Amino acid sequence: MPKSQVRKKKVYTPPTDVRPTATASTRKPSPIWLPATAVALIVVGIGWLVVYYLSEQAYPVASWNYWNLAVGFGAMVSSLILLSRWR
């Protein structure tokens, strides 16, 4: 069996001046209010939409008409934005 060749190239090491300054171990964890607020916004958004559809568009605010959908979906989207910042 032939002998394998010895590696002639050096192993690549990235330059030290290009490395990111903040590593994952130095970043602080998220505050406790962040996931709690995100879950609350999801529940409020879903609840808003369910009440809107089950009341045949009379509640939560009848004068807003279809803007009630924007409020419900806006609450859920804002919770997703909060959850994207969760560590």
Image (spheres, rainbow, N blue to C red):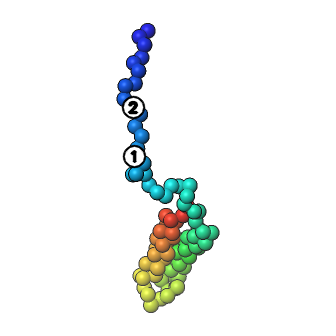
Q: Residue furthest left?
A: 9
Which residue is depicted at the point 50% across and 65% down? 85
Would residue 81 be seen by someone viewing this image from the given angle? yes
Q: Position of residue 3 (x, y in %)?
A: 42, 13
**SS at badge 1:** loop
Q: Secondary structure at mark 2?
A: loop
Q: Earlier in the sequence, mark 2 or mark 1?
A: 2
The reply to whether residue 50 is in sight is no
Q: Position of residue 39 (x, y in %)?
A: 58, 69
**Residue located farthest toward the front when viewing the structure as drawn:** 17
Place of residue 48 in the rendered image (x, y in percent of width and height, measured from the top left):
53, 78
From the viewer's perspective, tell me whether residue 9 is left or right of residue 76.
left
Instruction: Determine the residue positioned at 50% across, 80% down.
Output: 52
Q: CA distance from mark 2 to mark 1?
A: 14 Å
Q: Please tell me which residue lies in front, 87 or 25.
A: 25
Mark 2 surroundings: few (<14), some (14-19) or many (≥20) residues within 10 A = few
Residue farthest along the right direction in this orientation? 32
Q: Which residue lies under the disc numbered 2? A: 10
Residue 51 x %, y %: 54, 79
Nearest the viewer among 34 and 55 is 34
User: How many numbered markers are drawn?
Assistant: 2
> Which quarter shows the C terminus?
bottom right
Indicate left or right for 11 with 41 as reference: left
Residue sitting at 44 percent across and 55 percent down?
20
Q: Are marks 2 and 1 in contact (CB under 8 Å)?
A: no
| Category of crowding for the residue at label 1, using alpha-carbon neighbours closer than 10 angstroms: few (below 14), some (14–19), many (at least 20) | few
In the image, what residue type sits under mark 2?
Lys
Q: Amino acid at mark 1?
A: Pro
Image quadrant holding the N terminus, namely: top left
Q: Residue at x 37, y 29 (%)?
A: 9
Indicate whether 1 appears above or below 55. above
Q: State the residue position of label 1.
A: 15
